[in-house]
Image (tube, grey):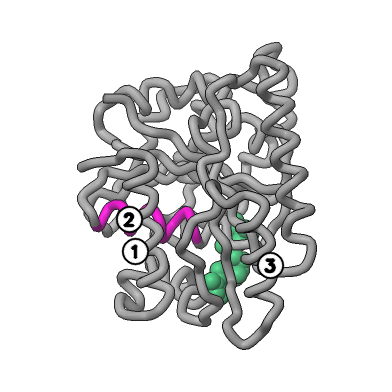
Amino acid sequence: MPATVFTIANQKGGVGKTTTAINLAAALAERKIATLVVDLDPQGNATSGLGVEREEGRSIYGPLLGEGSALDRVVPTRVKNLFVLPAEVDLAAAEIELARNPDYLLQLRKTLEPVVNSERFRAIIIDCPPALGLLSMNSLAAARWLLVALQCEYLALEGLGQILKVVERLHDAGVNPDLEVGGIVMTMYDIRTNLSRQVVDEVRSHLPEKIFDTVVPRTVRLSEAPSFGQTIFEYDPTSPGASAYRQLSKEVIKRFGLSS
Ligand code: ADP
Ligand code: MG
């Protein structure tokens, strides 16, 4: 069975994309679902957050531009069933080089095809840079499902509208007719403020079938874990952040019919 491909894309940085990619992937892995994180952000936060060293010439960059196989670049993490296709700084240049290719939106899809069909992974989660540039567009062209990480703050819906428009445009252009918004993850929920609750209520009233029931709380433990190269399940497995991502993984498994 081919892997189910998710992308976590959004035009904004600092909204919890990488935190969600890492910890959702780790929670799926904990439930024996072989999961691959594809780090498409030149900053490589997902790579380092999973405790993997960024090395020149070992990332998805080469394969993306037609050099070598992506499957060969996959590395295991310390976590069982959890793998990463690392990023490197040079990925930033890929945006420019991709643009030279007539099929510039479909390069990642082609690159990942053997990985998707390798039977090694059940789920693939692509972590995107904080902009809707060519790398993010490539991820949207390669994925079946878009997961949106949305911070509980003012104008959350506005940001959501922008990414939904991009999905529509990719549909209309025939780039990826299969792509759909799979779900919206509300992140950095602050129980002490009314604002967080209002934002969640608002998103829920607009997109009741898309928003996940699980809301990720703002907790310092989630922000500390990556500096130790650890997932929240290694760093503090009984913390509220760990519970939230476990809960989210159950919803994801159910919604998308994943099984080990
Ligand atoms: P993005 O990938 O969208 O840029 P990150 O996942 O890197 O966002 O999160 C941005 C910052 O906020 C990071 O320092 C991260 O550790 C922190 N962060 C993310 N989610 C939470 C959370 N639920 N609670 C507290 N801090 C968080
Ligand atoms: Mg990030």
Disc 3/disc 1 C-alpha distance (Å)? 23 Å
Residue at image mark 1: 246
- The answer to whether 18 appears left or right of 112 in the picture is right
Q: Residue at the location (24% across, 49% down)? A: 81
Depth check: give the residue in front, 133 or 194. 194
Between 235 and 89, the residue placed more toward the observer is 235
Q: Secondary structure at mark 3?
A: helix
Residue identifier under label 3: 199
Q: Which range is magenta?
A: 20-30
Percent coordinates x, y for residue 3 in the rendering: 34, 31
Cβ of mark 2 under 8 A from ligand 1: no
The amino acid at mark 3 is Val
Residue at point 55%, 54% (across, down)? 211
Question: Cβ–Cβ below 8 Å for labels 2 and 1?
Answer: yes
Q: Residue at x 46, y 80 (%)?
A: 221
Residue 247 lies in what quarter of the image? bottom left
Quarter holding the C terminus is: top left
